[in-house]
Amino acid sequence: MAFVTWLLREGQQNGKGYALSSASTYLAAAVVGLRERGVTASGDDQREARAALEGLAVKLLQAGERRGRRQAVGADFDGLRAIVRVAPTPSPVTGTRP
């Protein structure tokens, strides 16, 4: 519940909260990350966190706040180059990034 609340209130690096769909994606990634590290994250835990996320999203809408309702900014060459620079080097065997 605390993680979901943080995502919606101030999760972004600029201190603003994420949109519901982005927060949902980060929640799923957090569960996967926990499981990869041997932490038990049951289906009940996930359902509870998702229910909390939906409940908080309803409260945001009731307060008149809308998030994530505009067109995403298109990628530009400078941004793509920056991503490639920090991405791991592809594997010489498979050609994929780790």
Image: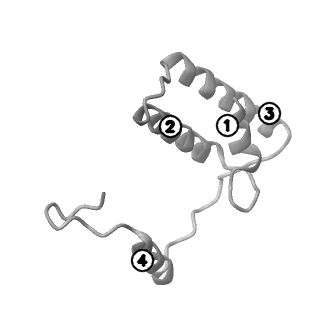
Please provide percent x and percent y for residue 63: 86, 39
Q: In the rendered image, which residue does mark 1 sit on? A: 3
Q: Is residue 32 above or below residue 77?
A: above
Q: Alpha carbon of mark 4 to alpha carbon of mark 2: how far? A: 27 Å
Q: In the rendered image, which residue does mark 2 sit on? A: 28
Please provide percent x and percent y for residue 75: 49, 73
**Quarter of image, res 71:** bottom right
Q: Residue at x 72, y 33 (%)?
A: 2
Please provide percent x and percent y for residue 7: 68, 44
The colour scheme used here is one colour
Q: Residues within 10 Å of mark 1 (few under 14, many from 20)?
A: some
Please provide percent x and percent y for residue 11: 69, 50
Q: Amino acid at mark 1?
A: Phe
Q: Residue at x 72, y 28 (%)?
A: 55
Q: Amino acid at mark 2?
A: Ala
Closer to us: 36 or 46:
36
Q: Amino acid at mark 3?
A: Lys
Q: Nearer the viewer, mark 2 or mark 1?
A: 1
Q: Earlier in the sequence, mark 2 or mark 1?
A: 1
Q: In the rendered image, which residue does mark 4 sit on? A: 85
Q: Are marks 4 and 1 in contact (CB under 8 Å)?
A: no
- Residue 83's mark? none
Taking the image as shown, residue 68 lies to the left or right of residue 47, namely right
Q: Is residue 9 above or below residue 72?
A: above
For label 2, the SS is helix
Q: Alpha carbon of mark 4 to alpha carbon of mark 1: how far? A: 30 Å
- Residue 59's mark? 3
Q: Nearer the viewer, mark 2 or mark 3?
A: 2
Q: Amino acid at mark 4?
A: Arg
